[in-house]
Every structure is written in structure tokens, then in C-alpha cells.
Image: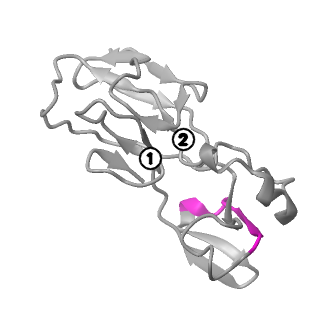
Amino acid sequence: MTAHNYINHSNIHLKWSRNIAPVLTLKSGSEVTFDLRDGYNNLITPSSKPDDLPGLDTTQADPAFGPVAVEGAEPGHVLRLDILELIPAAYGWTAILPNFGLLKDEFPGPHLRFWDLGTISEGYAEFKEGIRVPTQPFLGVMGLAPSHDVELSTIPPHDFGGT
């Protein structure tokens, strides 16, 4: 029987670095469950309003959890990771934050839309009555430690991982 490994959402960091100590070391083939926060570190809640967005700390975006070490894995090795299940939260959100992100110049914002994800197992979320948007949940930030001694933001993707 395989031991159950669990990492809660307090094992968080907001940078890529090979100097972050692993919170867990696993043997190849082991399984682990992560309790994750959303892409904005759970700072946006169902009670949030668009006027709350300009005050949010953008350095809290794209949190990473762990890290997890694999026994015997060395820099340059290829790791295979299977995501066995991904269970989204009960709600999601879409936001345009002033002066942040790809559309910051097109939409000065702020804008905030919540999504009820109760139908996600059926393959869609309802934008508003009668408008269904197909869904395909994904894990936001995932990667390996960088091979060089740097500390990099998790927001842009890198050759070792990202969004």
C-alpha cells in the first residue's frame, strides 16, 4: 500500500529557486495530494468587488506549492508527472486589474466576474443565463527548480516551468 502524502496550502512560495528546501521527498511512483490556492493566492473572494482590485498586491499572483523532491532525481533528468485528478473550487473568477496583465492598456478596469463552477464536471461553466463556456481545468503553475542559482518570479513562464 502506498503512503498518502499531503501538502497543504501553507507551503507556498512566489518564486522559482533551486535554494527553496523541499517540503517533502518522495520515491519515484509515489502519489501526493496538494491543497492549492487560486492564481491570486485566494486574495479575491466571493465578497470582493471591482473597487477592491486596485489595492491588491500583484506580487501574490501565481503562487507555487512545495517543492517536492524525488529520490534519485538529478539536474538534467527527465521527470514524468501524472495529474490523476484536479478538483476545482466551487467558484472561479475573471478580473482585469488596473496596470497589470496583458490587457492593461485596452481595459483600464477594474473589472471582476465570478463563475459558478458547479457544472464544470459537465464540461462547461455558465457565464450568464443561456451562455455556456466550455471548460478544461488546468493546474496553473508547475515546474522544476532552475538549474542556475537565481530567484525568478513565477509569473512569466521559463524553460523549467510556469503557467
> Is 96 within the magenta?
no
Of mark 2 and mark 1, the one earlier in the sequence is 2
Q: Is residue 11 left or right of residue 153?
A: right
Q: Residue at x 12, y 34 (%)?
A: 76
Name the secondary structure under disc 2.
Answer: loop
The quadrant where residue 5 appears: top left
Picture coordinates of residue 137 (x, y %)?
A: 49, 58
Q: Which mark is residue 141?
A: 1
- Residue 149 versus residue 120 in the image, above or below: above
Q: Residue 39: x percent and y percent?
A: 58, 50
Q: Quadrant of residue 54?
A: bottom right
Q: Residue at x 45, y 49 (%)?
A: 139
Report the disc number at residue 63.
Answer: 2
Image x and y of residue 130, in percent: 71, 85
Span highlighted in magenta in the image: 109-121
Judged from the image, the secondary structure of the residue bearing numbered disc 1 is loop
Q: Residue 109: which quarter of the image?
A: bottom right
